Amino acid sequence: MTQDELKKAVGWAALNYVERGTIVGVGTGSTAAHFIDALGSIKNEIEGAVSSSEASTLRLKSLGIPVFDLNEVDSLSVYVDGADEINSAMQMIKGGGAALTREKIIAAVAKKFVCIADESKQVDVLGKFPLPVEVIPMARSFVARELVKLGGLPEYRQQVVTDNGNVILDVHNLKILDAVALEKAINALPGVVTVGLFATRGADVALIGTANGVKTLGD
Ligand code: 5RP
C-alpha cells in the first residue's frame, strides 16, 4: 500500500468517531484532507465543521459542508487531525502544514482528539521531525537565539506566512525526552504564538494506518 492509501484508510476510519448531528473539529494536511472527503459522504448527518486552516475550509466548503467560526461553538465532541510524529504517550509534533495554532486551539476545545496517521509517523522519541514554532515576525531572531539556548537549531521557513500572519521556525536537532516541559518552556518565550508540541494535550485516540490495516491506540 502507498503512504497515501494508508492516509486514506485512517481518514475514513475516523468517521466512526463522528457524533451524528454535531459540529466536527477538522484538522489540516493530506491525511485530514481524506477525512474531509469522508465527512462529505455523511454531510447530511452532521451540523457542520470548525476548520483549522483556510485550506481545510476551502475543501469543506467545496463539498457543501457548513463551516462555523469557533466563537459560535460552545463545545466539540471530537477533533480529527494528522500529525508529523506521534509517540507511545500519544504526544505529537504537528505544524508541518503551518496550521499548528488553529489546530491547538480547536484541539483544546474538543472533548476527544483523534489522531490519524500512517505508520511512518510513529516514533519512540519525538524530535527527528523539525519542531515547528509559530512566531510573531518581529520576534523571529530573538526567539531563534532562545531556541538555540534550549539546544535546538532553528531554521526560518522561507516564504511561509501562516493564516494568522506570522512566521514559522523549524527547530532541528532536538531529542525530546520531556515533551510537556519543552512545550511549556517554548510557549513561555515572548513572541512565540504556539509551539507544535502537542504534549500537555495529546491525542486521546490514534488511528494508525499500517499494511495490515488500521490499528487503534488509546480507545
Ligand atoms: C498541519 C499538521 C498536519 O497534521 C501534519 O503536518 C501532518 O500532515 P500530513 O497529514 O499531510 O502528513 O500538523 O499543520
Image (tube, helix red, strand yellow):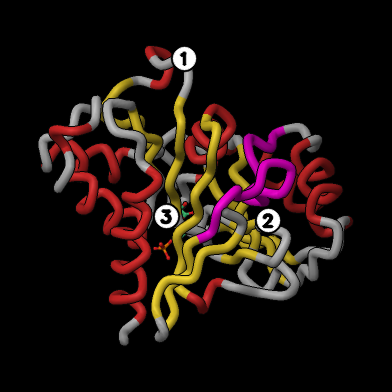
Q: Which mark is residue 159?
A: 3
Label of residue 74 in the image: 1
x 17%, y 42%: residue: 42
Of the residues shown, which amino acid type is indicated by label 1?
Answer: Asp
Q: CA distance from mark 2 to mark 3?
A: 28 Å
- The residue located at (82%, 51%) in the rendering is 182
Q: Secondary structure at mark 2?
A: loop
- Whichever of labels 2 and 3 marks the residue nearer the N terminus, that label is 2
The x, y position of residue 87, in whole percent, is 68, 66
The magenta-colored residue range is: 191-206
Foreground mark, 1 or 3, reads 1
Q: Secondary structure at mark 1?
A: loop
Q: Please indicate, yes or no, whether residue 34 appears anywhere in the rendered image.
A: yes
Q: Local crowd at mark 3 within 10 Å, few (<14), some, or many (≥20)? A: few
Name which residue lies at 31% across and 68% down.
9
Residue 142 in view, yes or no:
no
Provide residue 120's location: percent of width, then percent of height.
Answer: 51, 78
At label 3, which amino acid type do we have? Gln
Which image quadrant shows ligand 1?
bottom left
